[in-house]
Amino acid sequence: MISPLLANIALDGFENLGSDQKVKTVYTYENGKSAGNRVTNWSDGIRGIRYADDAVFICKPGTDIQKLRQDIDKFLASRGLRLNKDKTEVRKATDGFDFLGWHFRVNSKGTFKSHPSHDNYMKIKTKIRETWLAKKTPTEVRLKRIASQVRGWRMYHRYCDRGKQDLWAVNQWVYRKLKTEKRRTSKKEAEKLRTKLLRGHAKPKGAAKRQATKLEIEKAFPKVPWEVNAHVMVKGAASPFDGNTAYWVRRNSKLYTGPTADAIKRQKGKCAHCNLPFLEQMGPVELHHKDGNHNNWDNKNLVALHRPCHQMQAGRQRRLLRNHRKHIKDGIRKCAVKA
């Protein structure tokens, strides 16, 4: 946490370098009454984008790249820093470039495209495989961890083209491994039953077993919708600390999908426990089942809570359940004594 904070302090204003360069663009009308007329327009030649210590500068044709390089060196030198030459390069937009786990490219038709970078895609595949191969961990726990990893990765890349990189291959790999593991487990269980001389041991049919395995895989690889270039920039100079909670509640609610997003809408962006708005600085939003039954997905049984509020509600439910069980046991003892 300290490194990104220091980078933001030291590099504040770095993304504005080159904004003084203007590029002359001439447009010629081809249709209508103004056909043939030429219009001259001056626009910013360089647009800088920075996230912590990673930055990219989009330059239009005609900009002075050498001057930009000098401005960058001068800016960093004044802060006791220098540019990493191994990670710095000039590339054409048509050749593409990687930035923050995405690969950006302008195709031959002039359309801007983006998709997960090759390195980022290989990292998530390796991470999922390593999670599954941790054999000392129970199968259910491994599948839950994979579901968390897949959901996080797909949510991060929900605004780029995931058509060819949507973890299909690793999905099938986990499915085959799970089938093999279940086959071995069922054989061991059947052997134990035979040794105990139990009769009538019925295994589920092959189709039913395959269907059950597929359902487990669907839970381990939750679907997250994606749409290319649908990300909406922050409005003007809006800040989470400017008091405009309504705007930030609406914006942050788009970070969630499915039942959680529906619950946030029903509650008008406020926690069902403390009635405070869902803001980023107050932690993530979690879904709570009122009756404690995680198989009951009825909308009336689901509420959205802040994480601390969810922990308080879950603890209260556990205490109530313990007290209920204690009362039942006390009642059984009293009945036994009377008898």
Image (spheres, rainbow, N blue to C red):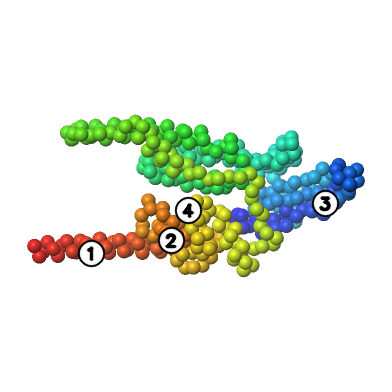
- Which residue is tagged 1? 327
- Residue shown at 62% from the left, 68% from the top: 243
Q: Assign a secondary structure to mark 4.
A: helix
Dot 3 or dot 4, earlier in sequence: 3
Distance of mark 4 from mark 1, alpha carbons?
Answer: 35 Å
Q: Earlier in the sequence, mark 3 or mark 1?
A: 3
Q: Nearer the viewer, mark 4 or mark 2?
A: 4
Label of residue 43 in the image: 3
User: Marks 4 and 2, Cα distance to the nearest angstrom?
Assistant: 16 Å
- Secondary structure found at label 2: helix
Q: Position of residue 83 (x, y in %)?
A: 71, 47
Which residue in the structure is indicated by mark 4?
A: 259
> Pointer 2: what residue?
310
Q: Amino acid at mark 4?
A: Pro
Q: Is residue 98 above or below residue 176?
A: below
x 53%, y 62%: residue: 269
- Tags 2 and 1 touching, CB below 8 Å: no
What residue type is disc 3 on? Ser
**Amino acid carrying mark 1 in the image:** His
**How many badges with numbers are in the image?**
4
Residue at figure coordinates x 66%, y 49% from the top left: 54
Between 214 and 88, which is closer to the camera in this rendering?
Answer: 214
The quadrant the N terminus occupies is bottom right
**How far separated are the C-alphas under marks 3 and 4?**
45 Å
150 displayed left or right of 196 = right
Residue contact between numbered discs 2 and 3, judged by CB atoms under 8 Å: no
Q: Position of residue 124 (x, y in %)?
A: 53, 40
